[in-house]
Image (cartoon, rainbow, N blue to C red):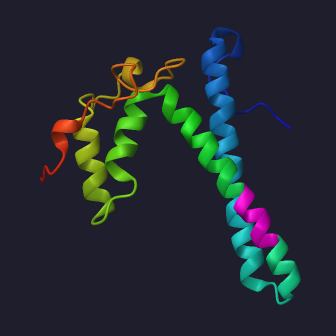
């Protein structure tokens, strides 16, 4: 396996940033595995083989969700935007645009976008600090 997840010299990156990069790579690998199983399930005629592949795909769903939650817990802005997009009815793009605007840093500053070890939200208490957005529309 290569170590191409780094776009900067690894020795210049903090341990937290290297872990973050590894978890991003894991998230990508889980998403790829989910897609591979989806393709296999689409063409597999044997019911027993399909059941086994479906079970394996469920494991990949779990791993993807765990990787994503790890990354979201360490990146408050990402978590805030994801909170505004995920599990919402309606237009996904509109939710994404509104969530990004509400995050306050549309310029993508490193402090807001990068991993913050152990952080769970902008206030550090698990709250995303966007309670005032409930019921808000564009």
Query: Of all residues shown, which one is farthest toward the front?
Result: 125
Where, quadrant-wise, is the N terminus in this rendering? Answer: top right
**Residue 121 location in percent, x, y?**
39, 26
- Is residue 57 in the magenta section? yes
Give the vertical position of 132 relative to 48 (above or below).
above
Residue at the image position 42 percent from the left and 35 percent from the top: 78
**Residue 40 location in percent, x, y?**
78, 75
Q: Find the magenta span and give its range.
A: 53-59
Residue at the image position 23 percent from the left and 47 percent from the top: 98
Give the vertical position of 73 relative to 50 (above or below).
above
User: Which image quadrant is residue 123 in?
Assistant: top left
**Residue 126 location in percent, x, y?**
40, 28
Q: Is residue 4 left or right of residue 84?
A: right
Magenta residues, dominant SS class = helix
Residue at the image position 63 percent from the left and 43 percent from the top: 66
User: Which image quadrant is residue 32 in?
Assistant: bottom right
Q: Is residue 91 visible?
A: yes
């Amino acid at each position: 396996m290569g170590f191409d997840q780094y776009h900067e010299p690894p020795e210049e990156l903090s341990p937290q940033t290297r872990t973050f990069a590894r978890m991003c790579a894991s998230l990508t690998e889980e998403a790829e595995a989910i897609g591979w199983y989806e393709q296999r399930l689409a063409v597999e005629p044997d019911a027993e083989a399909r059941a086994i592949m479906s079970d394996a795909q469920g494991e990949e769903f779990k791993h993807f969700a765990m990787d994503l939650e790890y990354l979201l817990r360490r990146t408050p802005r990402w978590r805030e935007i994801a909170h505004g997009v995920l599990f919402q009815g309606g237009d996904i793009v509109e939710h994404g645009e509104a969530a990004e605007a509400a995050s306050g840093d549309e310029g993508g500053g490193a402090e807001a976008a990068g991993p913050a070890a152990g952080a769970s939200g902008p206030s550090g208490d698990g709250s995303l600090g966007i309670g005032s957005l409930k019921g808000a529309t564009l």
